[in-house]
Amino acid sequence: MIEIKNLIKTYHDGKVETPVLKDINFSIEDGEFVAIMGRSGAGKSTLLYQISLLDHPSSGDIIIDGVNATDLSSDDRTKYRLHKLGYVFQDYALLPDLTALENVALPLIMQGKTTEHAYSVAKKALDRVNLGHRPGNLPSQLSGGEQQRVSVARAIAHKPKILFADEPTANLDTESSRVVIDLFKELHKEGQTIIMVTHEEEYGKMTERTIRLSDGKVVEDRKNR
């Protein structure tokens, strides 16, 4: 599903160069649940942003489902993200003035789906995360755990090829964190490819594979079971 070849990311600030990712190579199979782990500053989120097409690498190749994403134009990358990928962020990234249902439906409407179809699919996605009874609530009327579940519903509503999650439990209490991780495990059992950045060893062990970074390099790549 994903092949990363000689991936390098360097940030520039005037004449100062800061290398963050240093010649990263690995592949991820269709249906894998992978944790990207490492200490703060290791390059975890930077790596996720490259392979999820939210940022562009300095050099190297990112091949997703046979498509070399580094060759896509900016517009084509945006379309690919919208139609093929799903995202869950640690800060939920919900629009505060939209209800839960509207937040989940919005990407579908942006894809060109009718409002009726988008709302129908969004309702099913909220049902899937056990929030079908809260479609009219604004994010401010939901707990942190509930907001993250809305975020998951939004990410999976269009059945993405890959679900990317960047520290999805960072702002949650233990109970809410387990609910979100259990949702990911259920999705994985159904064949969803998931790539999750986490600093929490407990949740990393619940995936089937760990890729560990240190100083911008892969230092460990192992199966968890």
Image (cartoon, rainbow, N blue to C red):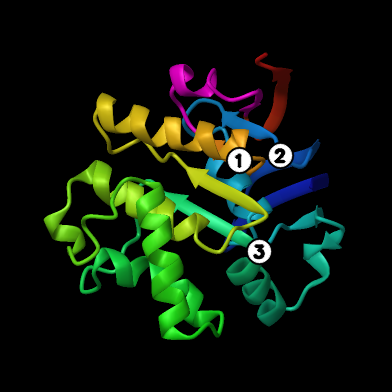
Residue 168 lies, in percent from the top left, at: 41, 41
As displayed, is residue 209 above or below residue 56? Answer: above
In the rendered structure, find residue 31 and report the number of the disc placed on it.
2
Measuring 67% from the left and 40% from the top, which residue is drawn there? 191
* Horizontal relation, residue 35 to residue 24: left or right: left
Identify the residue position indicated by label 3 in the image: 84
Task: Give yes or no for residue 203 being in the magenta stretch.
Answer: yes
Instruction: State the extent of the magenta-drawn residues as a range.
Output: 198-214
The mark that comes first in sequence, 2 or 3, is: 2
* Horizontal relation, residue 133 to residue 120: left or right: left
Instruction: Calculate the distance from the C-alpha at mark 1 to the C-alpha at mark 3.
Output: 14 Å
Identify the residue position indicated by label 1 in the image: 195
Task: Give yes or no for residue 24 being in the magenta stretch.
Answer: no
Is mark 2 in CB contact (under 8 Å) with mark 1? no
Mark 1 element type: strand
Mark 2 element type: loop
The mark that comes first in sequence, 1 or 3, is: 3
Quick one: quadrant of the C terminus?
Answer: top right
Measuring 45% from the left and 75% from the top, which residue is drawn there? 118
Mark 3 element type: helix
Is mark 2 in CB contact (under 8 Å) with mark 3? no
Instruction: Calculate the distance from the C-alpha at mark 2 to the C-alpha at mark 1.
Output: 10 Å
Measuring 70% from the left and 35% from the top, which residue is drawn there? 32
Question: Which kind of residue does numbered mark 3 sit on?
Answer: Lys
Question: Which kind of residue does numbered mark 1 sit on?
Answer: Ile
Count residues near mark 1 (Cα–Cα under 10 Å), then give few for <14, some for 14-19, many for 20+.
many
Residue 72 lies, in percent from the top left, at: 78, 73
Q: How many marks?
A: 3
